[in-house]
């Protein structure tokens, strides 16, 4: 049993209701919730003094805090986690939200990157937060590989994938290349490439070059190894983080410290180079995960929350993730089903492409 569930189970009905109403009030307005406000909403008639006593008990437990002397209470990070784990009511995605997501993603889109860019725009528009979309590595099987000479020191490798996508990557070929060495290199790759993904092909190439070193012309072998180095170092199909709606976060800030937090968030987003950790956050299960404050290891910003869900291909393999980041007072009850539905829809769209 988690600490949150344990604390909730230890509370009596009155304490649990005070806690729930403080958190819900804070999530709705972003302001501390005072005892006088709660006297008008509690299910049983209680004095402000009684409610203050309950709040003090909750503050002692570490689930509520008081940002200023004599102010109302707000949930702490521990309190928000307890609320999310034990009291958050999540229903199905609202019809209007589902219709907007469906409309945004309808129609043919030849490029997965453009499709995911539209996903980001839809999420940021619906949630009024910043959306994060992790574009998948290109894991479609390869249909054909071809080398094209551009100049004495530049060549192009053309990768045709089984799902119809084509990627062109420029690299520096070995000196002295000839049309015959380029054809031999392409034939060598095509003989083993069909049906394999790039990562699988890389592994096989390394073994085959060692086994067939004598059969391959030196130039052709160097051509293959140069192309292989390109895929490993440049990795043109690497994971790509698409961020949309960052300006929405500015609309939620009213105080100088909030603006500073948003600035830190922007810095984190801009600096992030290795974003595999974003996928790792969602890689422990199929459902939506919520990271509050410092639980969110992707960003140094403590005053933020991340709602993230992975999406999968037809083989039920996690290949990317979608999420929404914003202040800790996100409308979790609405955003969780939006993120969940979007992730499932993206997975279906990408899977359908692979079948085409």
Image (cartoon, rainbow, N blue to C red):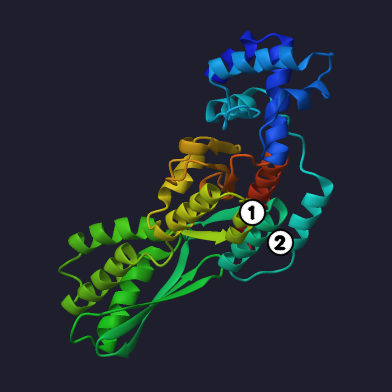
Mark 1 neighbour class, 10 Å CA radius: few under 14, some 14 to 19, many 20 or more? many
Q: Quadrant of residue 174?
A: bottom left
User: Disc 2 designates what residue?
Assistant: 105
- Coordinates of residue 220 in the picture (x, y in percent): 23, 77
Q: Residue furthest front?
A: 70
Give the residue at x 77% y 38%.
92
- Coordinates of residue 143 in the picture (x, y in percent): 47, 68
Labels 2 & 1 near each other (Cβ < 8 A): yes
Q: Is residue 201 above or below residue 180?
A: above
Q: CA distance from mark 2 to mark 1?
A: 9 Å
Q: Is residue 269 above or below residue 44?
A: below
Q: Is residue 6 above or below residue 333?
A: above
Disc number placed over residue 331 in the picture, else none: none
Disc number placed over residue 346 in the picture, else none: 1
Q: Quick one: 312 or 117, which is closer to the camera? A: 117
Q: Is residue 179 visible?
A: yes
Secondary element under disc 2, as helix, strand or loop, is helix
Q: Quadrant of residue 39?
A: top right
- Coordinates of residue 27 in the picture (x, y in percent): 68, 37
Give the residue at x 73% y 25%.
21
On the rendered structure, is 325 left or right of 173? right
Q: Is residue 254 above or below residue 103?
A: above
Mark 2 neighbour class, 10 Å CA radius: few under 14, some 14 to 19, many 20 or more? some
- Coordinates of residue 205 in the picture (x, y in percent): 28, 62
Compare marks 2 and 1 and give the one earlier in the sequence: 2
On the rendered structure, is 298 left or right of 291? left
Q: Quick one: 257 or 69, which is closer to the camera? A: 69
């Amino acid at each position: 049993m988690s600490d949150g569930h344990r604390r909730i189970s230890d509370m009596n009905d009155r304490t649990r209701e005070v806690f729930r109403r403080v958190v819900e009030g804070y999530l709705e307005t972003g302001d501390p919730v005072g005892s006088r406000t709660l006297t008008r909403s509690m299910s049983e008639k209680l004095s402000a003094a009684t409610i203050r006593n309950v709040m003090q008990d909750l503050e002692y437990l570490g689930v509520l805090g008081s940002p200023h002397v004599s102010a109302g209470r707000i949930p702490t990070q521990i309190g928000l986690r307890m609320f999310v784990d034990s009291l958050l009511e999540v229903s199905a995605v609202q019809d209007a939200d589902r219709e907007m997501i469906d409309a945004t993603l309808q129609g043919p889109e030849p490029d997965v990157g453009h499709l995911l860019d539209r996903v980001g725009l839809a999420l940021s528009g619906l949630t009024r937060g910043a959306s994060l979309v992790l574009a998948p590595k290109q894991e479609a099987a390869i249909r054909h590989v071809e080398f094209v000479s551009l100049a004495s020191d530049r060549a192009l490798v053309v990768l045709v994938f089984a799902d119809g996508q084509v990627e062109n990557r420029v690299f520096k070929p070995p000196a002295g290349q000839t049309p015959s060495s380029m054809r031999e290199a392409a034939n060598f790759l095509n003989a083993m490439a069909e049906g394999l993904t790039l990562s699988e092909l890389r592994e096989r190439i390394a073994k085959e070059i060692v086994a067939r070193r004598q059969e391959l012309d030196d130039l052709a072998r160097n051509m293959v190894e140069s192309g292989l180095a390109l895929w490993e170092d440049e990795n043109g199909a690497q994971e790509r983080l698409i961020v949309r709606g960052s300006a929405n976060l500015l609309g939620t800030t009213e105080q100088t410290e909030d603006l500073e937090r948003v600035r830190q968030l922007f810095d984190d987003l801009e600096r992030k180079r290795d974003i595999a950790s974003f996928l790792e956050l969602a890689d422990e299960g199929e459902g939506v995960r919520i990271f509050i404050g410092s639980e969110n290891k992707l960003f140094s910003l403590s005053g933020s929350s991340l709602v993230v869900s992975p999406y999968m291909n037809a083989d039920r393999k996690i290949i990317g993730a979608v999420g929404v980041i914003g202040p800790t007072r996100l409308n979790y009850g609405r955003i969780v089903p939006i993120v969940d539905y979007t992730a499932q829809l993206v997975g279906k769209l990408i899977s359908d492409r692979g079948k085409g």
